Amino acid sequence: MILLTCPHCGPRGISEFTYRGDATVARPTAPEGVDDTSWVEYLHLRDNHKGPHDELWHHVQGCRRWLRVRRDVVTHKVISCCDLAGDPAGDVAESNP
Amino acid sequence: MNRHPSMGRLIDRNRPLSFTFDGETYRGYHGDTLASALMANGVRVIGRSFKYHRPRGIFGAGSEDPSALVQMRAGARAEPNMRATQVELYEGLVAHSQNNWPSLNWDLGAALGLVSRFLPAGFYYKTFMWPGKFWPHYEHLIRNMAGMGRSAKAADPDHYEKRHAHCDVLVIGGGAAGRTAATEAAKDGSLVWLVDENAQLEALDNVTTMARTTAFGKYDDGLYGLVERTGDHLAKPEAGAPRQILWLVRAGRMILASGAIERPLVFANNDRPGILLASAAARYLADYGVAPGKRAVIVANNDSAYDVASTLIEGGVEVAAIIDQRHMTTRREIAGCEILHNHAVIDTAGRHGLRRVTIAPLDVDGDAVPQSERLIDCDLLCVAGGFTPSVHLFSQAGGKLTFRDDIQTMVPKTEVPGITVVGTANGELDGGIGAPIALSRGKAKQFIDLQNDVTAADVELAAREGYRSVEHLKRYTTLGMGTDQGKTSNLNGIAALANALDKPLPDVGITTYRAPYTPVTIGALAGREVGAFFTPTRRTPLQEWHEDNGAVFVPAGLWQRPHYYPRGGEAMADAVKREVLAVRENVAIVDVSTLGRIDLHGVDVAEFLNRVYINGFKTLAIGMCRYGVMLRDDGMIFDDGTVAHMGDNHYIMTTTTANAGPVMAHLEYYLQVVWPDLDVRLTSITDQWAVVAVAGPQSRALLENLDSDMEFANQALPFMGWRAGEIGNIAAQVFRISFSGELAYEMAVPSDHGHALWEMLLAAGKDMDVIPYGTEALTTLRTEKGHFVMGPEADGRASADDMGLGRMLSSKKDFIGRRSLRLPALMTEGRLNLVGLVPTDGKTAIPPGAIMGNRETPGPSMEKAGHVATSVFSATLGKPIATAMVTNGRQRHGETLWAHSPVDGRVVQVEVTDPIFIDAKGERLRA
């Protein structure tokens, strides 16, 4: 079981968390102005990366914060784990002011 | 019993035990394994082999043994495929042989051996996979014939525990290398665990030692799976003690000292009872004082054979010859024992156990010279093919292996962070091992995998058929895929493939080691999470009342909700009808504490609600409630519920019972990830409140009987209003919302007062015959009223418009999922709409889940027009009704369709109707 080091709770087994998906996908800030193709891409299309990948995890059985986890999907090595709100420079927060 | 007077360090001769094998009673000693005790009693044949039903005996002395598998115990504790070499003897032990019929010595399945040339590698794939529809028949026959032991039919009477632990250093293997490493590691004060799969493990200072504990798997980030067999060595576990404990241990680092396993040699008929690994033969004497035979031959490709010979001779076994496959290297003399270099065993004889071996010198190509064959009588053949390090957990952790020529085997090559491999597991073995030889193949079988009956010829056939990758070879031939995980067979299999492909052995590679090292019982993996504890059960504050008052329960997520409350011997249909009519005509109460409740605080709550619901919330006044529907961003309905405006910047949201958790996570996601600028704080308060709905035309009259400072008249508490006040001395919130379509109130009080509130409602309604109602009546009432619910109707593929809620969709604001409503798929004709159904004959129940068709006889040209969602008997209307999702359903009211049950073939003619069967104008709600 992968160990995630939650910035609020410390190292915890991954069974305390739920996975949402790709953290680099940003919800368009003004959905009404987006064409159908881009909207469907946002909804459904994801790249299947090999190697390091940014993912969204929710610490549901801990602090209930949404975290961005950079993880190598080949080796399972966790490279970083940070709170989205506490990381304004992050891709997701940046594209969703 | 045949025992050596002084050898046998593990047995206690003062503690004799009796046990039975196949119904015969035998004697053994405390400290014996079932294998050593059977051997001491002269039992040679332990079982029949998996595929060819050949007699098999004891081959090894530990977890590596591929063939001495037995059926242990009886009744509910029956356990198949247990290694006799690891089963500790206890008084009254009962074991049976496996895989034989009608008896061990006269086995019908052995006839398979006679037709075995028709059972080559991949036989099942080639023969039985076509035509596919016959496979279930073949499978049934094959399972009967090839099955191993039989599992118990009754529930396991024992219990199993699961424990989590941490240590700094986990040492696996209690041999010399492991003990030294553990002692060393403990010197700096580290928390050190030393585990060993065997029963004997001496304590060490400052080290936690655990015997009978197998480290079966290495998982991510230093997690190890251990299974401790706390009760397997007893007839049954001590009172209150578990049978086994599954340990999940996070270790800072691991030291693997799991030793090495001897390799067999491959030659014709190398599987007879009486043929043992040489090291195992020596162990039976040294550890248990049992001689595995009277006259032995040892065949070897290394020097370990000579020490084994000395042990056997010390134990009173005549060693007729040592057959050394190597050219003479160093000459070692052993008195009374013929030593033949550059020779091999090429065949054996003995129908129910070894009687004779055939040996021959080897020619320059390493093949036997047939003219120079010689026969040697013996009842024990020790095979010594060198040792293979047990690197399973290192390999599971991703460690790579490399082939070492001097010991002819794979050893750890790479560094794996946090893992150190020591001792023989790391290849600290005597060198001078002869390379494997491939003897020419006659008709006789040369076994590589004794458990799955895989022969050298099977490997060659697989190679000829193009299975060149060792991973493909494994899957095609099933080599190493038995319960022994190929501990004695994998390397010989690779050597045979290398030979067949004419490639050097290191180039062939090795199959990936996978957990578990030895089989782990499902009981240990399940632990306490069985039966009622399979999932947690959530209880409302009123659960006890429901139980005490005869409710029949139905699972709803993790809750157990009252389904209905039968009176006396009342049938379900009658109880539900009575409960429904009580709501429609009188008054009844229901426990709705399971609905999710989320408290929202912050200056942006109204804005946030506006973004998560399809309808507007900015105009919702304090003291009022509003129904809302949430979509996912793909435009499909996600959840529905009500929101009450409690005060300045304060709202309470309710969710459906099953979706309370997902809705909370959804809201947290949007607040933290998408709109972190919004000032909203969420708190789940489901467990803090007990909520009871009072419904029916008499509900106001009931409430007015309460000792309360609140007024319930229409002007004081209008439809969709809420008020706070006191009931008795309890602070309460009363929401005038309705799910049933009747005049109704939801009363919320702090959990601790839930029971008191319930009793006060029953007392206040006593004169008007108030009764409780369950979820089945609730379902009937909401179906009559045309309310959809998450699941049956809104199944994740339905939009708000599909449910007839198009007018709720606000055009003045953006909300989650709104953009998707303009996608072609959501605007197209032919979407499934919510409709009502009634049977044309007014009496036949409509099958739930039925497929809607436009004719009575199904066929390719039938229009498949959707499906039935919820089907109930409407007590109010006195006939069955249903909801359905029907193609263009809103335009088809009045049309006749047929509901086809895919389960039992029933076909019911129905009329499509408006989904609202009762009070379409909503006058009852507002009464």
Image (cartoon, coloured by chain):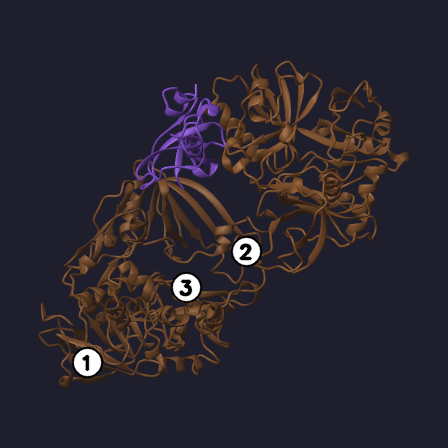
Chain colours: A purple, B brown
Please provide percent x and percent y for residue B777: 76, 43
* Label 2 residue SS: loop
Corner quadrant of residue B42: bottom left
Find residue B640 and name its label.
none
Find residue B238 and name its label.
2
Chain ID, mark 2: B
Please provide percent x and percent y for residue B13: 41, 68
* Label 3 residue SS: loop
Is B113 located above or below residue B828 in the figure?
below
Instruction: Identify residue type, mark 3.
Output: Gly
Chain ID, mark 1: B
Please provide percent x and percent y for residue B265: 24, 70
- Find the distance from the CA under tag 2 to the CA under tag 1: 52 Å
- Find the distance from the CA under tag 3 to the CA under tag 1: 37 Å
Left or right: residue B201 compared with residue B462 = right
Find residue B359 and name its label.
1
Please count the marks in the image. 3
The residue under label 3 is B31
- Specify the quadrant that holds the N terminus of chain B: bottom left
Please provide percent x and percent y for residue B570: 82, 52
Left or right: residue B784 compared with residue B495 = right
- Find the distance from the CA under tag 2 to the CA under tag 3: 19 Å
